[in-house]
Amino acid sequence: MERESFKSRLGFILVSAGCAIGIGNVWRFPYVAGENGGGLFVLFYLIFLVLMGIPVLTMELAVGRASRKSAVLGYKKLEKPKSKWHIHGWFCMLGCYLLMMYYTTVSGWMTSYFYKFATGTFESGMTSEQVSGVFSQLQSNPIEMVIWMAIITILGFLVCSRGIQKGIEKVSKVMMIALLVLILALAVNSILLSGAGEGLKFYLVPDFEKVSEIGIGNIVSAAMNQSFFTLSLGIAAMEIFGSYMSKDNTLPGESVKICALDTFVAIMADSPGRVLSLWRDLLFSLRVSHTELSPTKALHSYSLPCQMYL
């Protein structure tokens, strides 16, 4: 049976970008940038995306499109006789299964938050401590977490059962466009908050004191790790999407578009006003001084629940 292809170029880009865009952009990128000198980390991160991220992404898409098969079978089709490259495909599949366990759990949290917003659990005027308390209650109730994880997993299977064009592509077009609109709205709102300038400075201006404390080598390593993590490289995810890719599309061009969209969300998700307002609210609610709780630690510890609230 002939392998199905994406109906449109936009659909392929949005689905592939949807795979790359996730916790690495919305949660991990902001606090890693803050921990590693702000603007200098962002600069190295962008450099590694261009020098390493885009070429590796292009190669993964090329393997998928050339083979038109799954990760393991794709390697078997393309490798030389008696080669063992297909073993890497098995490790990729294992990585995808482990990643699914992680993401279905986190997606369950998000679905729970949506339900709690809709039913009035969250109210206007709640402090960051109260918001994080809702998250703590969720984590202390394994049955509730399993239920939400099961719901999101079943929904995922239902979408996949519809195929590429009628399922994944159709749903991703709506959800990815909605995500981009939401990210832009949050970014604009954050910039208009009081203290946004200080937040922007904390995020984009290099903190050379912190750079000297952490070490330039560690910052370079963190930026390199983030560039691979954010694009979902090394686990054959992009190879799988490439296997459904039309031969009319250029590999480097699609890679650049996916990388640009992923980076756009990462930069917008780290809204400067949100950084400062989160720190300020946490200091007030926890009644500690700036020497006891840095903005980086605050962002790391509370960003997931507080981002949903803010």
Image (spheres, rainbow, N blue to C red):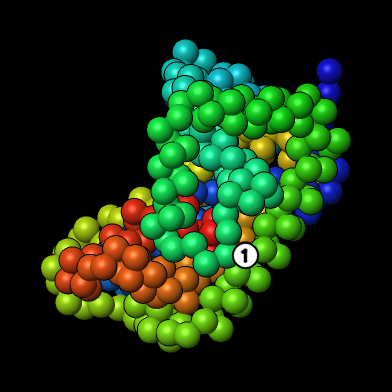
**What is the secondary structure assignment of the residue under circle 1?**
helix
The quadrant where residue 218 appears: bottom left
In the picture as drawn, the residue positioned furthest to the top comes out as: 82
In the picture as drawn, the residue positioned furthest to the left comes out as: 213
Tell me if mark 1 has few (under 14), some (14-19) or many (20+) residues whose alpha carbon lies within 10 angstroms of its own.
many
300, above or below 192, in the image: above
76, above or below 33, in the image: above
110, above or below 70, in the image: below
The quadrant where residue 260 appears: bottom right
Q: Position of residue 105 (x, y in %)?
A: 51, 33
146, above or below 62, in the image: above
The quadrant where residue 189 appears: bottom right
Task: Examine the rendering and report whether any part of residue 204 can be seen.
Answer: no
Residue toward you, 236 or 269: 269
Q: What's under tag 1, amino acid-wise?
A: Ile
Quarter of the rendering occupied by the N terminus: top right
Residue toward you, 74 or 270: 270
Residue toward you, 60 or 215: 215
Residue toward you, 229 or 135: 135
The residue that mark 1 highlights is 183
The residue sitting at 76% across, 26% down in the picture is 158
All told, the count of numbered labels is 1
Q: Position of residue 139 (x, y in %)?
A: 42, 36
